């Protein structure tokens, strides 16, 4: 008995390779245009590399988490549509190279925009968005709480590897972690919010791809 497999065509492309004005390809309008192109060309699959938050050398295969998303893929344009950014927030955009990604300046720029979006979120009375965020935190709590704590500590430790952290944090002493959670509560919430933004935009993009008959693998 032989199994007949349906033949499909696909293209490998990481979202960071998409064009855009913010130094790095993201999950915004250019990603939707890419899916439109795949659909019109009869391509059925979009193969991507891992989308996790990258560490040293910015390789998608060297991530801080197997579950978290890379917040630098969050689209500023879509954040504007959500009311979390305004046009003036983008007026000081650096001039990024067209044919390659310069990760250092791009990460600094995206980090600034994510911080602005987080401030807007905490100050706005957007009940629907806050409810979505709370639901997301509850749904993803099995990995999100530890990840956000890890990233907040790493930020406080000036991005040094965990092996260089103070001993009580390195060995996950309960009292030290509890004190750190209290001290870094706002930073922890910010990293959770960045994940919320990533997964919110990623879910919308995947849904659009399904509607266009494109399988993302």
Image (spheres, helix red, strand yellow):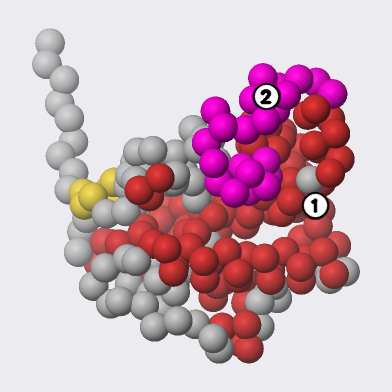
105, above or below 136, in the image = below
What quarter of the picture does the N terminus occupy? top left
Percent of width and height locating residue 150 = 64, 37
Q: Is residue 165 magenta?
A: yes
Q: How many marks?
A: 2
**Residue at the spot 82% in from the left edge and 64% down from the top edge:** 122
Of 187 and 196, nearer the camera is 187
Is residue 33 at all visible to an observer of this figure? no
117, above or below 145, in the image = below
* Dot 2 crowding, Cα within 10 Å, few <14, some 14–19, many 20+: few
Q: Quadrant of residue 17?
A: bottom left
Residue 57 lies left or right of residue 181; in this view the side is left
**Residue at the spot 44% in from the left edge and 39% down from the top edge:** 63
Percent of width and height locating residue 190 = 71, 54
Residue range (magenta): 152-175
What quarter of the picture does the C terminus occupy? top left
Mark 1, secondary structure of its residue: helix
Question: Which dot marks residue 186?
Answer: 1
Mark 2, secondary structure of its residue: helix
Percent of width and height locating residue 170 = 64, 25
Q: Quadrant of residue 23?
A: bottom left
* Dot 1 crowding, Cα within 10 Å, few <14, some 14–19, many 20+: few
Residue 53 lies left or right of residue 181; in this view the side is left
Question: Which dot marks residue 167?
Answer: 2
Q: Is residue 86 magenta?
A: no
Residue 212 lies left or right of residue 93; in this view the side is left
Q: Hey, which residue is sitting farthest left in the picture?
A: 2
Is residue 186 at all visible to an observer of this figure? yes
């Amino acid at each position: 008995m032989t199994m007949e497999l349906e033949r499909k065509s696909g293209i490998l492309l990481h979202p960071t390779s998409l064009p855009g004005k913010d130094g790095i390809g993201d999950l915004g309008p250019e990603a939707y245009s890419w899916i439109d192109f795949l659909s019109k060309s009869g391509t059925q699959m979009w193969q991507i590399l891992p989308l996790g938050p990258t560490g040293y050398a910015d390789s998608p295969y060297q991530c801080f988490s197997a579950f978290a998303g890379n917040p630098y893929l969050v689209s500023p344009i879509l954040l504007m549509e959500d009311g979390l950014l305004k046009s003036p927030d983008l007026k000081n955009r650096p001039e990024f190279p067209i044919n390659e990604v310069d990760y250092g300046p791009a990460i600094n720029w995206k980090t600034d925009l994510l911080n602005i979006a987080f401030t807007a979120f905490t100050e706005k009375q957007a009940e629907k968005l806050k409810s979505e965020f709370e639901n997301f935190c509850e749904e993803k709590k099995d990995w999100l709480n530890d990840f956000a704590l890890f990233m907040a500590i790493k930020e406080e430790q000036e991005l040094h590897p965990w092996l260089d952290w103070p001993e009580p944090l390195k060995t996950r002493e309960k009292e030290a972690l509890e004190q750190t959670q209290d001290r870094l509560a706002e930073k922890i919430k910010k990293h959770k919010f960045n994940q919320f933004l990533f997964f919110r935009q990623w879910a919308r993009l995947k849904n659009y791809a399904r509607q266009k008959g494109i399988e993302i693998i």
